[in-house]
Every structure is written in structure tokens, then in C-alpha cells.
Image: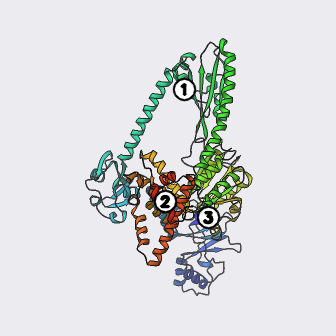
Amino acid sequence: MLLHDMIKDRILCLNPGDSLEKAVRIFKNCKIDTIPVVDPEAKLLSAFTRTNLYDALLSSASLKESIDPYVVSKVVSLQADLPYDTVADLVKNSPVGNAPVIDAAGKVVGVFTKTNMVLTLLRKSEILNTQLKAILDSMYNGVIAVDRAGLVTLLNSGAERLFNIREKTCLGQPLGRALPDLDMTPALERGEVKAGLKYRYGEVITVTNITPLTDGNAVVGAIAIFQDLTDLGLVARELETVKALNQTLHTVLNIIYDGIILVDDEGYITLANRVFIEFMDMLPEDIIGKHIAEILGGSRLHIVAKTGIPETCEIQNIRGKPLIVSSLPIIKDGRTVGAVGKIVFPQLAEVQELAVKLGFLQNKVAYYQEELQKTKTARTMLDGIVAESQAMKNIKQEIMQVAGSISTVLITGESGTGKEVVAQAIHMCSDRSGGPFIKVNCAAIPENLLEAEIFGYAAGAFTGAVKNGKPGRFEMADGGTIFLDEIGDMSLALQAKILRVLQEREFERVGDTKSIRVDVRILAATNKDLKKAISDGLFREDLFYRLNVISLRLPPLRERSGDIEPLARNFIEKYNRILKADIKGISASATAVLVRHGWPGNVRELENVIERAVNYARSDFIQVTHLPPYLINAFDQVKNTSGGEISSYRSKLNETERDMIVAALEKAGGNKTRAAKILNLSRSRLYVKMKKFGLLN
């Protein structure tokens, strides 16, 4: 902050020869104690103060007289570009309360007063308080501060969550009322720091650090920071699991007869097993942390770590011996993060030709397996989309049609309709299925982090950034597909950068100037009305048309009631596996309740309902009593309505029951015994219903 940010810049100046009356009017209107006297170019000549005015009046001067005999010729002025700290020192050490402020050319640009300084300090204090509150509320740990008398002065959202208390009811109250048995006396009375204290509040157990707050040498309060031991316990258990896995890994690596070596994505060695170390006749500390090129001059392991392309059964001379070497990339989240090398130690003279042939065959088999897996995965993805209704059959057909394209696809539909599943299906059915599928939930990532998450950031781009920078989701999706979910929640500034990627296929990392080109297909999804968002100024029209090259609208579940029953069967099979259950199906009455419901939560809500029902069911079939109360209550309300509505309801129920019987017969190929089994009915009961609905020939 500079001086020109703090001054009163709308003032009037005097010129030589001006009257005392003009000075009086300026004092009255501008509420200042010093008026600059300037030349025609607005450069400072002298100053006229209230004291000068009083002297003139006491000497019986007329208001028509000139100010010239009374002005102060030696004027203390300040430069407009002085920093805040320098101004603060001048105010502390100077008895003068006002001073003209001039720019680099010597022209008067305002008058600085101590009142300006006080107001600036108040604004700065408010900003600092707001920032401090935001920082404390963003902490997961609980924080509570008290004053010298032990009264609560601050309580962050972490403490509210941890102890189930509220700041507004605790502020100004003794700490003991909010947190009994928490003793902060040693910090308040003796300035002692207490770390690692165990404090229990009900069922919550925390580790607490208490620190005095001082002003100079005086203790003015204390602050306590609470860490939930539950979180620490989980971390400790996870660490123990990782340690056990590492020990198992080292044991396995050290009992095999092949040499194993691991490198990171830069080619630096992170692990080597006993066989490799002994063969190299070196100590572990001479190998770990070194670049692979320093240890094995002809190694291509660091190249595999960069390209992600495996190299198997290659012949390499190591320490004068021809050995079989394989290098395989380590893939994490679709990105190569390192490589592992395996060295086989046979007598190569007898098997060299065989090794070459074997390597060729392995590569060939790997290629065919990869192609087979692509086809299998694409078919599995499509089969997983339930499409008994015509609307969903059309969607599956569109997926197959647009998958072969490189155009952008915009998937719209209410929350829970399965937009991400459709995006994955488009990717798996495309030529990019071998590449990564990267998802970005634009609504789940905080706005201030979303740009860095999408585009990555350069080294030192901001405080806390990874030392060497970090690639973004677009770089990770290179050669594959990126799915921008909930794109309607993206800010306008970030929308402009997404538009550039769509148009030019390049971008810069945050904090970098180098452009990065990518080969990425973009799929986007939203549950918002983007045309309305455009009219409201919340979404760019040009981005909408770039995204909306191909549009897929997923119908809500209420518009595809024919899919409710097959979806329910799928979810029953899924949760039978997960929950180790053995539910055979769902009763007709329970199915009628499901079909009658409006499903505002769509497929996701239906899945939750079935998961609950599988947990509660104690029979072979899910019954109405196993469904959530809100579904049953809504169903009962329909049954208790007026006669006309009852008639409409019964008609709808009969129509649904007839459709279920027709679908079962089609699935059973006309075999009535099998159809009855599908519907959980006896064969005779099925005949009765078929006769009722006119389905018997």
C-alpha cells in the first residue's frame, strides 16, 4: 500500500494573491487544516494553515486581503509513492498533522492527514481479521482462543464440528462453560506452553497444544489447538498396513532369482533387490538414489519410464555378460510414474535365439490381448446400460454412432441419470479406449484450485506448489478422453481458457508461458439449463456452441418407467455380491410401488433404495415392507385419494402389471412356465392374469 492510496485527493488549492475569504471557504468545505499554495502548473510553492488564518484575523486583517503575508514558505511535503511503513514512521515521529502530497513532477495531488492514517489502519485491520478468520475456518483442527480473563474470543469451524458447539453461544463466555476440565491457567498465569495434552470431551478424544498469546512480555491470552485422535488412529493403522506391505514386497523381491530394479519417472533408482545388488558387487547406498545411467550405462529403463512403452526380452551386456532384460512402465491413474527392470541370469549361449523368438511372440500375444480387452470392455460398458425403454435404446445407439467421432459431446440430464456412465461408454467404444479417461468434477473442486487442477502449474507458481510443478488433467488425458462433469458450475474466466483448448488444442500451465499441445477428446456434462445460464450471463455462448457439437440428453427415470424393473434386478445382483445376500428378485407389489414413484433422484435414488431393501430383506424376494417409508407413504396416499383418482391409479397399476407380464413372456420366448418363474407367480396364477388382460389366444 502506497501513500496515494491513503490521501484525501479531492481538495482545493490556493494561488498567490488569493484572498483570506477564499481560504476560509476552502477550510469550511474541505475539512482540512492545511491548504497547499500552488503555481499555475499546480506545483507546490507554500502552504496556508488554520493557524495562519487565526494570525491574520487577530491582526485585524480584512477577508479581502491577500494570503501572501501569512503563508508558510517552508513546507514539509510527502511523495505520493511512499510505502505504508515509511509513512507510519513519519506519523509517529512528526508533530505535524497535515502535509501536502506531491507526485514525481512536484505537482500537488492531495493532502495527507493523520485521520487518513487511522482510517487506513482500520481498513487494513478489517482485512487481516477477515483473512485470519478464513484461514482458521479452513483448518481441519479445532482452534479456541481466550483472553487474559479466560473468556472465549475465537472459536473456528473445526472446533464447532469437533465438539458440537457454536461460536455465537461461546464468545465472551468463560471457557469452562464450553469445554469443562480444559485448564489453560498455566499458559495465562505463567506463560507456559503445553504440548501433546490428552483432552476428552464426551466421546471425543483429542491431542491438545496450548500456547500463551503475548503482547511484548505480557500475556494477553492463550490459544488451544485440538487434533482428533480418531484421525490419528486411522493414519497410524494405514501406516502399519503400508509398512507390512513394504516388508512383504522386500521379502518377495529378495527370494526370487532375477535381478529387480525400480526407477522413478526421471530415471532415479528407488529400489533394487538383493540379487541385483550382489551381481553389481556394490553396496545398497551406492545404488539407491543414483540415476540408472550411472549404474547401467546401456540401460533403457529411464526411457521406458518416460515413454510408457514396455521393452521385453531384450539382450543387454552387463559387466561383460549378455543377459535377458525386460523393462516395464509403472502406470498410476493413466500416467507413467516410473519403470521396473527385470534381469534374468541364464547361460545365454544356449537360449539366445529362443529368447529373441520368445520376446517376439510375447509382444504379439500382448498386442492381441490388448485388442481383445478393448472389445470386451466396450461391450461390457454397453451391456451395463439398462435399455428396455425406447428412449434408452436410442441413447445406446447414439453412443455407438458418436464414439467413432472426435467431436465434442455435451451430455445433459438431471442429477443421477448416469451421465458419467455414458461418457465412459463413449470413451471405451472409441479408438481412444486404450488411452486414459480423466474425469474432472467442476463443482467438487474449489474455484481457486480448479484452474491448477485442470491445466497444472509450473515450478514455484504459488506458495505450497510442488517443487518441479505438476501436470494438469488435460496433460494426463493426452491421447485419451477428458470428461468435464458439471461444467455449468465453472467460472466465466476458466470457461474462456477451456474455449481456447477447444479451438487451438493447446494451453499453458498456471505460472508458465510455454504452450503445451494435447490430443484430447472433450466430453462435458451438466444438469443445468445452459441456455438460461447464457441469458443470465453465467455461461459463455461461444463455449456452449463449441461444446454442443453433439448433444445427448439423458431422460429422467420417470420418463423411462419401463427400465425401473430391470434396473432393480441389476442392482439386486450387484448388492447380492457386495452384501453376500441371496435375494431372488422383487415382488410385484413392491415393483408397483417403484413404478408409481416420481424418482427425483433418478437412477442413483433407485440404487440406494434397492441397496437398503437388500439389507432389510429376510426372504427370497424384496417386499413392500423392505422399501423406505417415504415410498410406502406416498403409495398409501394414492390409494386413499378420491374415487376418480383411485380409478386412475388402478388403471395405471393394471397397465403396469400387463406390461410386466408381456415383458416376461418376451424374455421367456413365450414359455409360460419360465415367464411365471420370472414374475414369481404360479403357472395357474399367471394364466388367470393373462386371461384378465386378454393375453390368451
Q: Which of marks 1 and 2 is nearer the N terminus?
A: 1
The answer to whether any part of residue 416 appears in the image is: no
Q: Name the residue under label 2.
A: 687
Amino acid at the residue labelled 2: Tyr
Locate residue 495, reporting x and y percent.
65, 59
Q: In the rendering, at what x and y percent does residue 643 appear? A: 44, 78
| Amino acid type of the residue tagged 3 in the rendering | Ala
- The answer, for residue 504, to whether it is visible in the render is yes
Q: Where is residue 247 in the image (x, y as percent from the top left)?
A: 44, 28
Q: Name the residue under label 1.
A: 288
Q: Which of 199 and 309 is in front in this view?
A: 309
With 227 as the anchor, is 63 left or right in this view?
A: right
Circles 1 and 3, Cβ within 8 Å, touching? The answer is: no
- Relative to 426, 570 lies left or right: left
* Of residues 209 and 31, the one drawn nearer to the viewer in this rendering: 209
Q: Find out whether the residues at labels 1 and 2 contact each other: C-beta distance under 8 Å.
A: no
**Residue 80, label in figure:** 3
